Image (cartoon, grey):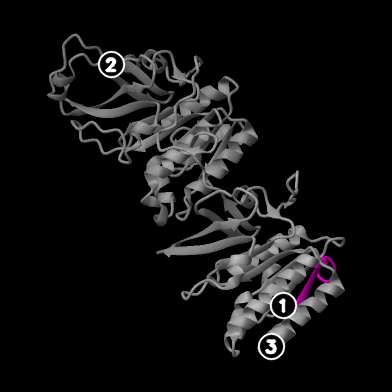
């Protein structure tokens, strides 16, 4: 052969799954869909079947000692992908319950061959093949009978050029049946439950002839059907996965933060494409700073997206975000669900960024983000942040993340998640005690690859947002309640702009 065979890949009809499969389902392949009861195997098979089937290229669904077709249809018709007008035409349902109950695999095979010859389908689904395994075990010399059945079935369907799916339970502990070896593809579905949250996951363990996305990917079942969320990968070069934090893009462009005086502290604004961590205790104004960042982008024609894990825009002390969202200038992803995965959040965020061509992104906050992520993913939360920042960096967006910190007044920390090294810039907001009162101070800790101010400045929060005032020259004295006499209050406190 001088040229490789051209294998056509069929779109699965399941959002996100084709990216995991490496482009879709190979035509004329035999794919196993396996998993524990209730994980979504039949739903996945039906969603693909209704996506594939046409009158010219029909599908036949063999129900083998599982749910009766009428009962199965009663529940599957609740999904948006279900098409009642396709039943009996583009989609045919065949009940093999009586054939498999007799335990004669030769009779089962003959019935399948008879139906395929009569209907000439392009797609064949058998649910569940576990019933065939059980029937074989009840026979004398069942292993040989099973091998012969699988060989004859595979050879027959290949001859008819069908794309075939066998649906069933996981491999038994005693080892995988022969079909696991001869199959072209193997999709494993799993689910884990922790208290009140449930997370469904899938793995493509095998798909011949194409490069699949490795690892575990999450999926969700809604009224629309199944939606898969491919894992974000971290790459420096194509095909090379690294464990280093993503490098910021080289850019001479600086973007304005929307807070007077803060751009100067950053060395002329925040470099475009950077990730910024704003850390501070409760009430220090992190969300207000993030709002100013988005509002400045809107003023400059740079759409933004905010992911709100805590308070909704209407709960904010300033209605600016709510107004921008209503005007379509800022996209909102607002969720308090407690069973999300990082991949689901990233995919929703990426789609919103691409749809709006957003240039600025706010994650408010990492504390709420950790609570929203399902418990099974929290132990890998640091890695999740790493992958999220890498994914957003690849889109060329500038990212601002807020992080809640417990202010101990003398203890300087940036983030409880060890995420400071992942970001390109850090701003810290703090409280200091002066003469039995608290004042807010702000400082720029780092701006990677750029000079920046090291001053500690006071600031106040008013009706117009954050007003940065005078610097603190005698920080130790202020901590001890001994401010310098020459120190002046912030400009905002004197009743005029800074």
As drawn, the label of residue 104 is: 3
**Residue 314 location, x and y as percent?**
50, 40
**Residue 204 location, x and y as percent?**
57, 56
Circle 2 Cα neighbour tier, 10 Å, few/some/many (<14 / 14–19 / ≥20): some
Circle 3 Cα neighbour tier, 10 Å, few/some/many (<14 / 14–19 / ≥20): some
Queried whether the magenta region covers residue 77, the answer comes back as no
| Magenta region, residue range | 84-94
Q: Which residue is mark 2?
A: 455
Indicate which label's residue lies in the foreground, 1 or 2.
1
What is the secondary structure assignment of the residue under circle 1? helix
Is 62 or 353 nearer to us in this picture?
Answer: 62
If the image is split into quadrants, where does the C terminus sit? top left
**Residue 460 location, x and y as percent?**
33, 23
Indicate whether 266 appears above or below 9: above
What is the secondary structure assignment of the residue under circle 3? loop
- At 79% from the left and 61% from the top, the residue drawn is 53
Q: Which residue is mark 1?
A: 69
Indicate whether 34 appears above or below 345: below
Indicate whether 342 appears above or below 362: below
**Residue 2 location, x and y as percent?**
75, 44
Which numbered disc flags the more N-terminal residue, 1 or 2?
1
Does any portion of residue 465 appear in the rendered image?
yes
Which numbered disc flags the more N-terminal residue, 2 or 3?
3
Indicate whether 282 appears above or below 143: above
What is the secondary structure assignment of the residue under circle 2? loop
Residue most toward the front? 1
Location of residue 426 (image quadrant): top left
Which numbered disc flags the more N-terminal residue, 3 or 1?
1
Location of residue 400 (image quadrant): top left
Is 135 or 278 nearer to us in this picture?
Answer: 135
């Amino acid at each position: 052969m001088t040229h490789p065979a051209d294998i056509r890949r069929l779109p699965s009809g399941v959002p996100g799954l084709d990216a995991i499969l490496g482009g879709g389902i190979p035509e004329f392949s035999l794919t196993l869909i396996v998993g524990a009861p209730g994980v979504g195997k039949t739903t996945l098979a039906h969603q693909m079947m209704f996506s594939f089937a046409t009158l010219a290229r029909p599908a036949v669904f063999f129900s083998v000692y599982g749910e009766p077709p009428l009962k199965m249809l009663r529940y599957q018709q609740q999904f948006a992908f279900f098409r009642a007008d396709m039943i009996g035409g583009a989609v045919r349902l065949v009940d093999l319950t009586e054939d498999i109950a007799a335990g004669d695999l030769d009779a089962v095979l003959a019935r399948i061959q008879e139906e395929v010859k009569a209907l000439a389908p392009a797609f064949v689904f058998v649910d569940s093949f576990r019933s065939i395994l059980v029937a074989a075990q009840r026979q004398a010399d069942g292993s040989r009978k099973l091998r012969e059945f699988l060989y004859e079935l595979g050879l027959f369907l290949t001859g008819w050029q069908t794309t075939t799916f066998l649906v069933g339970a996981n491999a038994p502990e005693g080892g995988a049946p022969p079909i696991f070896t001869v199959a072209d593809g193997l999709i494993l579905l799993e689910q884990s439950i922790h208290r009140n949250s449930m997370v469904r996951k899938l793995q493509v363990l095998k798909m011949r002839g194409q490069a699949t996305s490795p690892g575990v990917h999450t999926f969700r079942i809604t009224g629309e059907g199944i939606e898969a969320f491919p894992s974000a990968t971290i790459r420096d070069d194509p095909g090379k996965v690294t464990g280093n934090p993503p490098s910021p893009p080289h850019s001479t462009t600086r973007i304005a933060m929307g807070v007077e005086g803060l751009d100067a502290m950053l060395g002329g604004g925040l470099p475009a494409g950077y990730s910024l961590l704003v850390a501070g205790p409760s009430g220090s104004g992190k969300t207000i700073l993030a709002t100013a960042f988005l509002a400045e982008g809107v003023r400059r024609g740079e759409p933004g997206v905010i992911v709100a894990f805590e308070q909704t825009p209407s709960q904010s002390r300033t209605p600016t975000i709510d107004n921008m969202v209503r005007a379509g200038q800022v996209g909102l992803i607002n969720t308090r669900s407690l069973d999300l995965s990082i991949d689901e959040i990233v995919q929703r965020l990426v789609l919103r960024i691409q749809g709006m061509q957003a240039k600025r992104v706010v994650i408010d906050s990492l504390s709420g983000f950790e609570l929203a992520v399902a418990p099974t993913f929290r132990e890998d939360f640091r890695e999740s942040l790493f992958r999220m920042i890498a994914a957003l960096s690849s889109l060329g967006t500038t990212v601002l993340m807020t992080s809640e910190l417990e202010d101990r007044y003398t203890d300087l920390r940036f983030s409880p998640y060890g995420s400071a090294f992942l970001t390109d810039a850090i701003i810290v907001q703090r409280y200091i005690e002066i003469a039995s009162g608290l004042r807010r101070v702000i400082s720029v800790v780092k701006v990677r690859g750029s000079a920046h101010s090291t001053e500690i400045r006071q600031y106040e929060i008013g009706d117009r947002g954050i007003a940065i005032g005078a610097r603190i020259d005698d920080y130790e004295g202020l901590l001890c309640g001994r401010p310098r006499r020459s120190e002046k209050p912030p400009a905002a406190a004197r009743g005029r702009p800074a």
